[in-house]
Image (cartoon, helix red, strand yellow):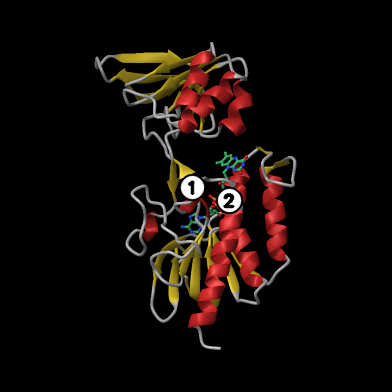
Amino acid sequence: AFDVLVVGGGPAGASAAIYAARKGLRTGIVADKFGGQVAETVGIENFISVKATEGPKLVANLEAHVHEYDVDIMDNQRALSLKSGELFELELESGAKLRSKTVLLATGARWREMNVPGEQEYRGKGVAYCPHCDGPLFKGKSVAVIGGGNSGIEAAIDLANIVEHVTVLEFDTNLRADEVLQRKAASMGNIKIITQAMTTEVVGDGKRVNGLNYTDRATGESHHLELAGIFVQIGLMPNSEWLKETISLTERGEIIVDGKGETSLPGVFAAGDVTNSAYKQIIIAMGSGATASLGAFDYLIRHSAP
Ligand code: FAD
């Protein structure tokens, strides 16, 4: 059995595993895909002390750092359920069952999808979730941003500097973004905001996106927009569905943790984007991974036999 079994191989999980291994604890990492969201990131300029790097490079560094220690890495393995008992039991999609004295959940988050026809078909062919990654591909073209929250308006402002025109489609009657972001967006000549717009379909020529259809919720009328790209910014979903019967989550599905990263289930800790931490960033995920790992160590010295 493990002392600390980390679920998730993003920055939070990697950091947690290193901290646990450095305590001499038997440590394992189960990851659906090692690297997590960082693997999808192009430029990273806010990882303090590293002026600029790229996602795949940072993932390679994370992996190399974890490999410096005696950590059992189980990549391409998905956790399905967690049971408590004398030892915690983590069941994997492969059918394997892993046992551990403590569990550290660092399963991250993913962008919410619109679930409309065409979205999956044109994913990566005009449908994007990451303005930082894909913005430059639409230089000189028209795009839409779906969602008028902070991430949507931030994306629109970001994209407006690169692309020709940005249309923001907000489902509600009002934007939910901070005032300062709304003012900034309004001051930019190439951002148009449409409220009460329900996107109904992503349209393309079979190869790439060339437009979208939406319904004006006030009038019920359907409209078509011609554009080359659609950035979906309607929220980040924590990867915690498989835990909802086991531990306490917020309304949004985030794992609730205390100051030591402990969840509602003693001996189970959590870190990174899957938790109710205030902001979702690499440096924050790594810091919380360290906190939760030290929390697990603390738990073990109090609860486990010598
Ligand atoms: P994640 O990185 O999401 O990793 C989660 C891990 O858990 C993955 O290994 C995943 O495969 C695994 N997993 C999930 N479910 C299961 C399961 N059931 N079983 C097993 N494993 C599972 N932050 C910055 O600081 N700077 C940036 O420039 C920046 N740019 C970004 C650009 C993009 C496109 C995106 C998407 C995010 C960006 N972020 C950036 C945010 C940053 O990537 C995240 O805050 C950070 O990766 C969160 O780390 P994490 O370890 O909590 O989760």
Of 62 and 226, the residue lying toward us = 62
Q: CA distance from mark 1 to mark 2?
A: 9 Å
Q: Could one spot residue 206 in this view of the protein? A: no
The earlier-in-sequence mark between 1 and 2 is: 1
Name which residue type carries label 1: Ala
Relative side of 102 to 39, left or right? left
Q: Specify the label residue 168 is tagged with.
A: none
Residue at the far left: name it.
219
Provide residue 148's location: percent of width, then percent of height.
Answer: 42, 27
Relative side of 220 to 79, left or right? left
Of 92 and 245, the residue lying toward us = 245
Residue depicted at 61% across the width and 70% down the height: 20
Image quarter for residue 11?
Answer: bottom right
Residue at the far top: name it.
189
Q: Is mark 2 within 8 Å of ligand 1?
A: yes
Image quarter for residue 163?
Answer: top right
Residue at the far bottom: name it.
306
The residue singled out by tag 2 in the image is: 284
- The answer to whether the residue labelled 1 contacts the one labelled 2, judged by CB atoms less than 8 Å apart, is yes
Vertical comparison of 45 with 49: above or below: above
The residue singled out by tag 1 in the image is: 278
Residue depicted at 49% across the width and 25% down the height: 180
Of 58 and 224, the residue lying toward us = 58
Q: In the structure shown, which secondary structural element does the residue marked by tag 2 occupy? A: helix
